[in-house]
Amino acid sequence: MKKSISILTLLLVGISAMGVGLSQLTLSISTQGPDFYADNTAVQVGEKYLLVYVSNGATFAGLNSDGTLVDAVGNQIVTDAVAVEGAKCGFKAIQYDPDMYLPGGDFIVVLLDTRDADGAVGGLVAQIGTSEGADAASENSITLNSISVAAKAGDDPAMVASTFALAPAGTQPPVITSLKGEGESVEIKVGNVRALTNYEVQSTTDLSAGNWEAVSGGTRLQLSAEGGDEIPRTLAVPQDDKVRFFRVIVLGS
Amino acid sequence: MKKILILTLALFVVGIANAAIQPLEGTNVVGFSAVVADLGDNQIITVPYVACLNSDNAIFLADLVSTNGLKADASDPALADQLIVMTYNSGLDKLVYYYYWLNNGAGWTAIETTLVEDGSTTVITPPAASAFEVARGLGFWLKRANGSTADVYVKGELSDANPSTGIVDGLNLVGYGSAGSMNLTNVIWTGADGGNGLTTTSDKIIVVEDDGSLSYYYYFTNPDWPGAYIDLDGMWITEAYEVADVTIPAGQGFWYLRRNGGNFNFEPDGSN
């Protein structure tokens, strides 16, 4: 009777075991922060992180501006996570079948900079930062696996999104279709654009010097939806400008 | 004289009354056990007790581990001590991991786990720690956050029932469901598989030591081996084929790898 009750209790409460066909591994991720964007500002709450699996023999090839992997064969997006207060990746736990991410490969945490022209997160991927790789566990792992990305040294940030995401394949060179105004502000329109690409308006006052700089408010210009052809934008320029030239580039190209 | 006689009689009567009065004992005994779990470590702990006032019944996770002195945080699970349980989910037909973090003011708080499958994800929401029953002999992880300094205690009611822990094929995260420590040499492991004397096929116990290293012990049964091995029959042994005189502290769990022989309940005090 006692043995029957013991077995029944076991079934009711649950079996703490890894039997054939039931095997699962777990992994948790977080960063200790503070993590930063390339312009030295702290990562905003709501910013996105990815957990990526890099297969044995492959390297992490980066992201396209639409958030897809440059190498979708050698790299796999496992899951995403969100930045929380403290400019860090919030704690996230996953579990998976051991056959999905084989030992020999690595897990890395990728910080995304998805700020748009107005500074709000949730746009296209402009830049990324990556952590060191952590070995994928074997099927018979009995350890509790976790990735907690720490600051590299001293006051250095844990992660910095400083590598450009790539423009999707087939992106055409943009063209400025109109320019209005002068003095304190100008309005431009950029054509031959697509929705999944970041554009940047640059200006210079000396064509021969070639010192093009991003115009304030003119970076990370994005179409709101595929199908639109022009990005209108009003940009502030120095009040005492006598001459200024503009061009548009594709970020990550 | 009469006063002395009365006094003596009174004292005699009191003496008889005291001899007859027996203390009324309570119906149960409760206790706590300290578990070695240093900061920054992942330690396997186990359930040595049952719920108060319900001898033989399971205890809830929220009641099992004393939070006094543990590291809590107001908002970040990564900065708090955590409990992680591995258990079978019948709805998903797979093992699942339930994470709980010590939320300052709210106690053990469940964290969702994302089940990643080929082409899809499923969010697994653990039951509340106050509603999650854990049976004696179940093992789970205690993950100490950096900065955790206090001892960890498991607590509950002592049970009169002999400890009994279910084992299935593969890796089992379990413990000895007793408030006392367990020595591998002092118990009878009816049901364990000795692998015909081979450590590569026998049942295996894996203990996580205080420094994070792993120690391995193998169950040995083979009465046909030469005389030197007779004393090993029915014992847990080391890789060097020596008796494993190992004491596992109360409240500490371990891995039990069942390679052959199917499910069984080990009751290591020999009661079965």
Image (cartoon, rainbow, N blue to C red):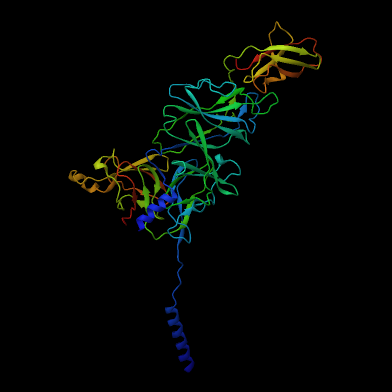
> Image height check: is B267 above or below B84?
below
Of B137 and A10, the residue lying toward us: A10
Of B134 and B246, the residue lying toward us: B134
Answer yes or no: is residue B137 visible. no
- Quadrant for the C terminus of chain B, please: bottom left
Picture quadrant where residue A55 is located: top left
Image location (x, y in percent) of residue B190: 29, 51
A1 vs A33, left or right, is: left
The extreme front residue here reads A227
Of A250 and B246, the residue lying toward us: A250
> Image height check: is B3 above or below A209?
below
Image location (x, y in percent) of residue B198: 26, 40
Picture quadrant where residue A92 is located: top right
Image location (x, y in percent) of residue A1: 35, 58
Q: How many labels were placed on the picture?
A: 0
Of A80 and B66, the residue lying toward us: A80
Image location (x, y in percent) of residue B126: 52, 45
> Image height check: is A200 above or below B83?
above
The extreme bottom residue here reads B2
> Image height check: is B160 above or below A10?
below
Q: Residue at image x 44%, y 34%?
A: A97
B218 vs A50, left or right, is: left
Answer yes or no: is residue B217 visible. yes
Q: Residue at image x 23%, y 48%?
A: B231
